[in-house]
Amino acid sequence: MKKWKVVVSDWEFESLNYESDILNHEQVEFVPAQCKTEQEVIENCWDADAIINQYAPMSKTVIDALDHCKVIARYGVGVNTIDLPAATEKGICVTNVPDYCMDEVSDHALALILSWVRKVTFTNNRTKAYDWDFKVSRPIYRLNGRMLGLVGLGKIPQRLSEKAQALGLNVVAYDPYMSEEFASQLNVQLVSLSELCKKADIISVHTPLTNETQGLISQPQFEDMKKEAFIVNTSRGPVIDEDALVEALRTHLIAGAALDVVEEEPISQEHPLLQMENVILTPHMAWYSEQAEMEMRSKVAMGIVDVLLYEQYPKYLVNNQVIDKRFLQMHEGEKRYEMIANKMEGVK
């Protein structure tokens, strides 16, 4: 009987219990590894039939060395660790989990917005330093009626838009792939990036990291923004040009920033953002809740099951062009995913 080799290239969880439970099958050999470099990935994965990937580089060099791989499943939404054209050319399905943390990330972005607007983090720090005086928070402006600008209008910013509008915020968005008709159904006005920067009091970044979006927010965009504006990023650090951001904060082109992600993670101890009072930082945690982690890891493993055991394209296929390279059945396994939802209901 054929044994499928499934390698976890790297992970940052306490265990791999969710993945191993789903991949516990007589035809599957489950192999955990902790790779950081291209060479380590090649040494551990060259003969893998499937790879579960978090941060380890899945470059063209790595993919060219994969002799048997049929599917690479990426923890999370973004697939910037994987060379998609190289994977597609080699007939490797790439899968992610685009729907696992919509509430978590939109909640976190909203929490950063509220913390900034009400200066919760700043005044907490001042109060703990024995500065009991509300005047240190001046100026604070009413949230109701202000303008939120969303860079990207996918599922997460759509959810954030609903929550923000309930608090009285008006919403504009920049997304070249979204139709005005769909945006209007969300009560969102589509605008250019320049217009968004000029109009918005709060800018929240939600675009994936691609060649097009790397450095999308840079000096020209900061120069367009209001001096009272602040920017929130819960997507990927390199979408914002960090040097330009630091300079914009230092010279007061903008009022502040609230960041869950930075260009290099973890952030360097010498990074100037750590010394700025007008910056809120969290450690790339917007995606996290107990339910979201379980859902993400379980669905990643199910993407492997789809391809290897059921010979179907994975439910969350990223590179649809691979359909011309690899001939599998179209996905029909919706019921298999119901067990994940059932398990999530038991997580408190």
Image (spheres, rainbow, N blue to C red):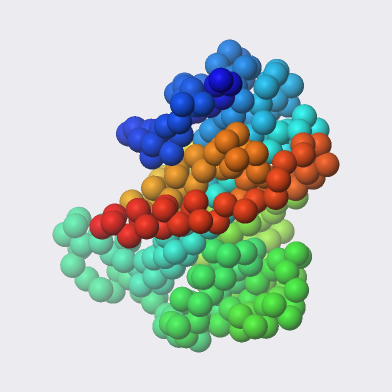
User: Residue 157 sits in which quadrant?
Assistant: bottom right
User: Residue 144 sits in which quadrant?
Assistant: bottom left
Q: Residue at x 50, y 86 (%)?
A: 145
Is residue 166 shown above or below 340? below
Viewer-closest of 163 and 256 = 163
Viewer-closest of 26 and 104 = 26
Q: Residue at x 42, y 32 (%)?
A: 24
Q: Judge from the rendering whether residue 223 lies leftward or rightward of residue 31; answer left or right.
A: right
How many marks can you see?
A: 0
Viewer-closest of 145 and 8 = 8
Q: Is residue 275 visible?
A: no
The x, y position of residue 297, in whole percent, is: 45, 43
Q: Judge from the rendering whether residue 50 lies leftward or rightward of residue 342; answer left or right.
A: right
Q: Is residue 162 visible?
A: yes
Viewer-closest of 92 and 263 = 92
The x, y position of residue 261, in whole percent, is: 50, 48
The x, y position of residue 322, in whole percent, is: 77, 41
**Quadrant of the rendering where the N terminus is positioned:** top right
Q: Residue at x 52, y 43 (%)?
A: 302
The x, y position of residue 266, in whole percent, is: 45, 36
Is residue 141 shown above or below 82? below
**Quadrant of the rendering where the C terminus is positioned:** bottom left
